[in-house]
Amino acid sequence: MGIRLKTQEEIEKMRTAGRVVHQVLEQCRSMCKPGVTPSQIDEAAQHKIEAEGGRGLFKNYPTYRTGEGFPANLCISLNECVVHGIADDTPIRDGDIVGIDCGVEVNGWCGDSATTVLVGNVRAATRKLCTVTEHVLQLAVENMKPGRLWTQIARLMQAYAENAGMSVVRDFVGHGIGQAMHEDPKIPNYVGREILTNDITLREGMVLAVEPMCNLGCKEVVTLDDGWTVKTADGKPSAHYEHTIAVTATGADVLTDGR
């Protein structure tokens, strides 16, 4: 379908959805304590989304591996789980990191954001992983502007992570977003053959969900038999941060920061 540019009015509608996503993630952050289960967080998120007039985008999202939709309202991914973790009744423990990804549609427009919550006494190396990954996302925000090639930004993101001793996940990338959660283009967090062949020139009105995922160990991942849960191949921790970002005439406008 190609890349669809959004008007300022449409971007403001997306900000409304993004505001709900931010509120949900803040509620999740406050709930991430030892003894609380991902299922409890997921259920509370559903109530919050509905109370704010939104519709969760993840529940029943289709997969072509198992033929079954995603079974939860959020993706909740602990420790070595990279993305697409399914909420269960295993209590969160002190020292865990909890990746939470939320997508919401309000009045036909979507918002998508993720954060990683540090619970209690997190190991120093894992804490550094989270700090680095969050800064990788911030680098993208600071460098997005019309006329810039995405490879220029992806190269900055990848270099920062790798210079800090982290690896960048290759199997999952960001995406365009608008009236559907996943639109063109694909937005990698690294420079690879595909983006070098089909580079993207940023234009005013593009709205992108940028979501770096970095691992403390190797970049390789494995998908479990449920067809959804993705873990690091070496069992080391992974962190995930994401914002929905509009390209403006002067730079970037984060639509999921709660404003």
Image (cartoon, grey):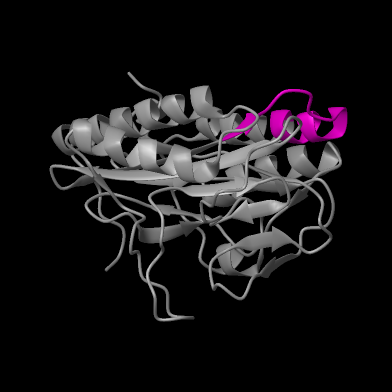
The answer to whether 148 appears left or right of 255 in the picture is: right
Task: Give yes or no for residue 1 being in the magenta stretch.
Answer: no
Vertical arrangement, residue 9 with respect to residue 74, above or below: above
Q: Which residue is drawn at 66% across and 56% down?
A: 191
Residue at 81% from the left image edge and 56% from the top image edge: 235
| Viewer-closest of 9 and 152 | 9
- In front: 211, or 3? 211
Q: In which quarter of the image is the N terminus?
A: bottom left
Residue 217 seen in the current view: yes
Q: Is residue 233 above or below residue 13?
A: below
The total of numbered circles placed on residues is 0
Q: Position of residue 138 (x, y in %)?
A: 58, 29
Image point (13%, 42%), residue name: 107
**Is residue 1 shown left or right of residue 99?**
left
Residue 80 in percent (x, y) is at: 73, 51
Task: Where is residue 108? Give x, y as percent.
Answer: 15, 48
Q: Which part of the image, by quadrant, shows the C terminus? A: top left
Tell me if residue 119 is in the magenta stretch.
Answer: yes
Q: What stretch is highlighted in magenta?
A: 116-131
Residue 147 visible? The answer is: no
User: Is residue 127 toward the left or the right of residue 90 in the image?
Assistant: right
**Who is closer to the viewer here, 13 or 145?**
13
Front position in the image: 41 or 22: 41
